[in-house]
Image (cartoon, helix red, strand yellow):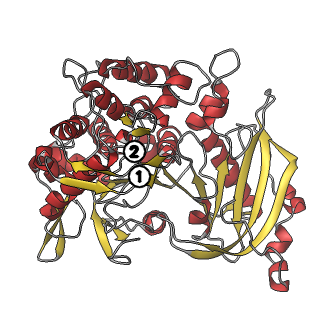
Amino acid sequence: MKFLTGLLVAATAAHAATLGDVCTSKYIKSVLPDSQTIESLIINPSSITASAVYNASIPDDPFYPAATISFCNVTFAYAHPGKNDQVLLNFWFPTSEDFKNRWFSTGGGGLAINSGDNYLPGGLMYGGVSGRTDGGFGSLDTKLGDVLVQGNGSINYDALYMFGYKGIHEMTVIGKAMTKSFYGMMQGNDTQKLYSYYQGCSEGGREGFSQVQRYAEDWDGAVIAAPAIRFSQQQVNHLVAGVVEQSMGYVPPPCELEKIVNLTITACDKLDGRADGVVARTDLCQLRFDVESTIGAQYSCPASRSMDGSILPAQSGRVSSKGAAVAREIMRGLHTTDGRLAYMPYQHSATFDDAQATYNATTGKWEAPVISYGGEYVTRFLQNQDLDTLPSLDGITYDTLVQWMQEGWQRYEGSLQTTWPDLTPFQAAGGKVIHIHGEVDPSIPASTSTHYHEAVREIMYPDMSFEKSTEALNEWNRLFLIPGGAHCGPSTSQPNGGWPQTTIRTMIDWVENGAKPERLNTTVLAGENKGEESELCAWPLRPLWKKGVLECVFDQKSYETWVYQFDAFKLPVY
């Protein structure tokens, strides 16, 4: 585990009087909730492990600042009535002195239902118990892809539905009940208020919305980042860039695409009113930047090692008309061969991660990549094959990709798509959402979030004007785009972009004190401006600096660059 290795766990006398006394299997057994309290789920007392951890040093993370924490690390298993299964949970309990009547659920990433212990400190440092689940997949390190396809070529629907929405909900129900028992919050006929929160990014963002859409009473507040909703479209979308390269007959060297990105940043940097190496107005960049202006620019990159460990040769040359054409086609988003739009593209100045060619040392040529997220989705979720990815993109066209999107959408509408736009029950229960997304996310397009946010507004407030419905939605559900932000963290190509590291604290203040965040605080976490603080504008307002002062403005043409009509499908895409 990331934070436990090498930690000092021997208790001092002062610790033994508090954390050491309760961090035992015996005490944990005594505070287990009964099955009636937790929807008939059956906890196995013999599975309990408990260990005290003192003064663990937690480094800086995009979702929480550095801290020192002490906690009781607890694992145990539960089962579903009538099923021969086991679901493993891992909870971190703060000391009684640090506990602030809070529970935090956490989510996963990729095809994992949890993110290791990466998110657990984010709740603990704010006085809450933090929890994660293995979804019943066999271990906390096992992913859905490892158990999805059964030996006979069929889908493991128990695992699918646990991943889709049940696993996080059951963890929350058990976690809240156990937290109350652990700290003695049930006193006579009075029950102390336990505030319940969530934080997750990417798949964890999708999991967050899966709960907000289904379980109105589970959480008081959810911090949801870069959600992988529209699961079928999202996963297949990773294959678009490779199919573009193959269809157009030109695979740009990575250095050529990197040069195009850098020139885009330079050209669009000042559109927000200041020069800081961050494209804070990707909408204006889309309206004003022509990728053909990069043709002829010289690029040069030394030999390097790729993420998979292979050696990439040194690259040099000039941006070609073919390279610019490939970039432009990728930046259009997926269309059918007759021109109908199927999905949104990444924002201008995002890196071309899905287009990163692989180098064939035998032929000395660059080859179109098969991005694993997309390839594994097709093989396992659509073809029911226990294969990690597609062997190649041979024979795959734009229409093939659209067909795969349609097929997966229909097959997994009720489990993974996660786009139900009517959040009235959650809003009526007093729930709050802070929804954030890196504007130049190269894995999940930022417009994934703006499109869903607008769908919720239109469905929930159909009889209001744009201004009034936006105001009504923002009373409890706020979206913040992060200029220069990449996927679940700052961008290495735009390091001066701030990141909202303390959003959980902002959410707590909103839920418990009524302090609605008109703007969201950010901190630059790397680069030459490290430590600089700024603010984010709440959607649909956009940042504009005037004489060194940030203003949050709205203009119709910029807004319209974020609005998409997906006419490749007959059903509405929320």
Image point 38% across, 39% down: which residue? Answer: 357
Instruction: Write down the quadrant of residue 535 in the picture.
Output: bottom left
Which residue is at the front of the view, 482 or 487?
A: 487
Give how far across and how far down residue 116 sits, in percent. Answer: 63, 53
Give how far across and how far down residue 174 sits, in percent. Answer: 70, 48
> Are there few (<14), some (14-19), or many (20+) residues within 10 Å of tag 1?
many
Q: Is residue 139 left or right of residue 29?
A: left
Image point 11% across, 77% down: which residue? Answer: 547
Residue under circle 2? 443
Q: Is residue 569 left or right of residue 171?
A: left
Secondary structure, mark 2, is loop
- The amino acid type found where label 2 is placed reads Ser
- The amino acid type found where label 1 is placed reads His
Image point 71% across, 39% down: which residue? Answer: 39
Q: Is residue 167 left or right of residue 381?
A: right
Query: In the image, which disc is placed on residue 390?
Result: none
Please report contact status of discs 1 and 2: CB closer than 8 Å, yes or no.
Answer: yes
Secondary structure, mark 1, is loop
Res. 540 visible in picture: no
Give how far across and how far down residue 316 sits, in percent. Answer: 27, 51
Residue under circle 1? 487
- The image quadrant where one finds the N terminus is bottom right
